[in-house]
Structures are given as C-alpha cells and as structure tokens.
Amino acid sequence: MLDRTGHGSLYNDYSYFIKGADTDSCVGHARATQKGWLSPKETFMGSAFCLGLASVLGLYLTSLVSSTTSIDFDCYMVFVTVSSVFNAFCYTGGEYPLGYIGLGN
C-alpha cells in the first residue's frame, strides 16, 4: 500500500507534470504538483522516500521469513523487489515509459 499509494501516485504526478501532460484543462482528481501544493522536487523526493521505505520493509520481511525457515536470504524476493523499483520508476517516467507502450499494465 505504501508503495502503490505513496510512490505510485506521487511519481505519476511528478512525471505527468514534467512531461507537460498535466495542464489546467485536465479533468479528474487534483494532482499536487499541477495545483502547486508541492514543488516538482518535493513530489519526487516524497515518492522516492515512500519507495525506499517500502523496499526496506519488504527486504526486512524477506529476511525474517528466511531466518525462520532456515533458507538463505531469498534471492527471488530480492529480484522481485529490485525489479519492482525499476518498474515503479519506468511506468510513467523515463524516455520510453512502460505505461505508454502497453507494457505497464
């Protein structure tokens, strides 16, 4: 939840604003950067904080499960966490956002 709500919404807001997709003529829910409630830097830093916190918590929970089941640190879950971080930023950000070429959903 922290990842989807915190990072997802904030980073999408940041990406849309930077790309110029958020204008006053946009319909729908208010976006914090578009409305001037947060600067682009604040929006990006908030999303990075939420994603970082969610990643640390996920890796911590993975280590707890690994220690109770006598299995080494689960490399599969580390891969899932790292690829999720990549996908979270690449969904609407970057030069070729995944959400716009049919690979994001």
Image (cartoon, rainbow, N blue to C red):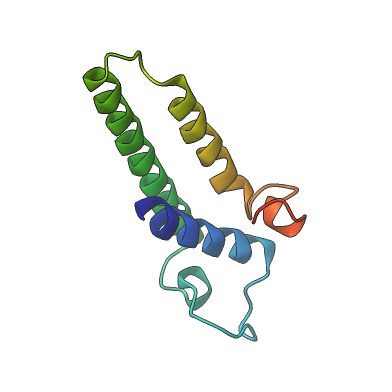
Say which residue appears at 46% left-offset and 60% top-offset.
10
97 to 62, vertically: above or below = below
The spot of residue 17 in percent (x, y) is: 60, 66
Q: Within the image, what quadrant is residue 57 found in?
A: top left
Choose between 100 and 72: the one closer to the eye: 72
Q: Which of the image's four quarters has the N terminus?
A: bottom left
The spot of residue 90 in percent (x, y) is: 63, 46
The spot of residue 75 in percent (x, y) is: 46, 20
Choose between 73 and 22: the one closer to the eye: 73
Say which residue appears at 41% left-offset and 51% top-offset.
3
7 to 78, vertically: above or below = below
Choose between 57 and 17: the one closer to the eye: 57
Left or right: where 27 falls relative to 49: right
Say which residue appears at 46% left-offset and 74% top-offset.
36
Choose between 101 and 75: the one closer to the eye: 75
68 to 28, vertically: above or below = above
The spot of residue 6 in percent (x, y) is: 39, 57
